[in-house]
Image: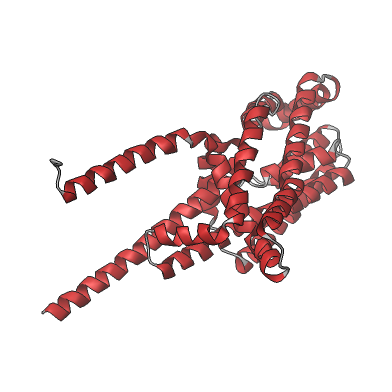
């Protein structure tokens, strides 16, 4: 006969579940990007999946495979290709000597005579090189890790779609709040995902395209490359793509093209910057209002954890956390009201 009573056995089982769960979470920590990426893609493509299955009558495996193919073509492969291009270009800049050295000398001379900063360009380039190395880790060296991450991501995504009814029913069953709050949380989570991923993605593409167009008009070399860099930087709050117009304008000033430099500064800081604000206002109005502080703090959270993916995942994680806090506060207030009602009925 067991020496433990019913309550003690349940307590031991609960502690064992928590301990084993912590070990499992620790073991899966390297795949957290895959899990979060699968959740993001599921949230984005869920309406399209339901359209194919419920409206068109396609079976679930085929619809799931179509979504996987579309996401690979539209999101993953372009992102990897752009990352390779950026890394290759950074390596080219580090190894080339002719144009970059001339630009550095001219900018340093201009900054030294105007702002008393004779090593401005050299110091800035060193800082940018270090930052870019951390932000864009060597894809060649981590190719196996990237493939594993994508395989796990799409493995999870496939079964999330194929067993969508069971998956969503399980989420409702094990959610730590009532069904109406679970549905409210799901809607808020969807809006937050759309705002942080789709909304910021649209802003990044538009800013990058405008930056590349401006650099091409004013004769800055490699406008497409700098447009891609601008798209990545536009995920950074406060900084943004328009700030790239500042060193470009300094280069024009150093080449005695003062008018072009002034126009480029005005184009970047006034036009591109305001386009960003207008787009963000429209997206927040149509989807969800993501506070700038969430973007700022989220980026600092995400970059050390996920690298460049942290530009998206960081604000997303922080938004999810704040949503959970909001649901908790709602549950607590509901429980307090219920306790007061029961206390009044008992008295």
Image height of 107 relative to 6, above or below:
above
Between 113 and 87, the residue placed more toward the observer is 87
Q: Quadrant of the N terminus?
A: top left
Query: Is residue 105 at least partly visible in the picture?
Result: no
Q: Quadrant of the C terminus?
A: bottom left
* Model colouring: secondary structure
**Residue at (45% x, 52% y) in the render:** 321
**Residue at (80% x, 38% y) in the render:** 225
Q: Residue furthest left?
A: 347
Q: Is residue 341 toward the left or the right of residue 95 in the image?
A: left
Location of residue 346 in the rendering, given as x and y in whole percent from the top left corner: 13, 78
Location of residue 24 in the rendering, given as x and y in whole percent from the top left corner: 42, 37
Instruction: Name which quarter of the figure residue 12 lies in.
Output: top left
The image shows a total of numbered marks equal to 0
Location of residue 61 in the rendering, given as x and y in whole percent from the top left corner: 67, 54
Instruction: Name which quarter of the figure residue 111 lies in.
Output: top right
Q: Is residue 301 toward the left or the right of residue 124 in the image?
A: left
Location of residue 96 in the rendering, given as x and y in whole percent from the top left corner: 82, 20
**Residue at (71% x, 43% y) in the render:** 76
**Residue at (59% x, 57% y) in the render:** 43
Query: Is residue 310 at least partly visible in the picture?
Result: yes
Q: Is residue 221 toward the left or the right of residue 172 in the image?
A: right
């Amino acid at each position: 006969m067991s020496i433990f009573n019913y309550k003690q056995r349940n307590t031991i089982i609960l502690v064992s579940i928590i301990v084993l769960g912590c070990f499992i979470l620790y073991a899966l920590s390297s795949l957290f990007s895959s899990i979060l990426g699968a959740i993001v893609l599921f949230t984005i493509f869920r309406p399209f999946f339901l359209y194919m299955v419920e409206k068109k009558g396609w079976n679930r495996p085929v619809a799931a495979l179509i979504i996987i193919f579309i996401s690979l073509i539209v999101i993953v492969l372009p992102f990897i290709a752009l990352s390779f291009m950026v890394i290759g270009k950074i390596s080219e800049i580090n190894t080339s000597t002719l144009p970059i050295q001339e630009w550095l000398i001219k900018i340093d001379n201009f900054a030294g005579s105007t702002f008393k900063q004779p090593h401005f360009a050299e110091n800035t380039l060193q800082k940018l090189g270090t930052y870019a190395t951390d932000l864009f880790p060597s894809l060649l060296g981590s190719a196996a890790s990237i493939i594993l991450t994508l395989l796990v991501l799409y493995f999870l995504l496939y079964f999330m779609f194929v067993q969508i009814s069971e998956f969503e029913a399980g989420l409702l069953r094990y959610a730590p709040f009532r069904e109406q709050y679970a549905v409210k949380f799901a809607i808020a989570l969807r809006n937050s995902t759309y705002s942080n991923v789709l909304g910021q993605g649209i802003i990044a593409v538009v800013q990058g395209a405008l930056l590349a167009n401006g650099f091409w008009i004013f004769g800055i070399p490699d406008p497409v490359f700098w447009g891609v860099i601008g798209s990545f930087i536009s995920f950074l709050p406060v900084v943004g793509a328009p700030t790239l117009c500042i060193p470009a304008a300094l280069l024009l000033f150093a080449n005695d093209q003062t008018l072009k430099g002034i126009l480029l500064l005005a184009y970047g800081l006034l036009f591109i910057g305001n386009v960003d604000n207008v787009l963000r206002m429209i997206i927040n109005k149509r989807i969800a209002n993501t506070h700038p502080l969430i973007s700022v703090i989220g980026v600092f959270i995400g970059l050390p954890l996920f690298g460049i993916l942290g530009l998206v995942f960081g604000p997303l994680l922080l938004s999810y956390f704040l949503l959970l806090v909001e649901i908790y506060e709602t549950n607590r207030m509901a429980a307090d009201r219920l306790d007061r009602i029961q206390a009044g009925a008992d008295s």
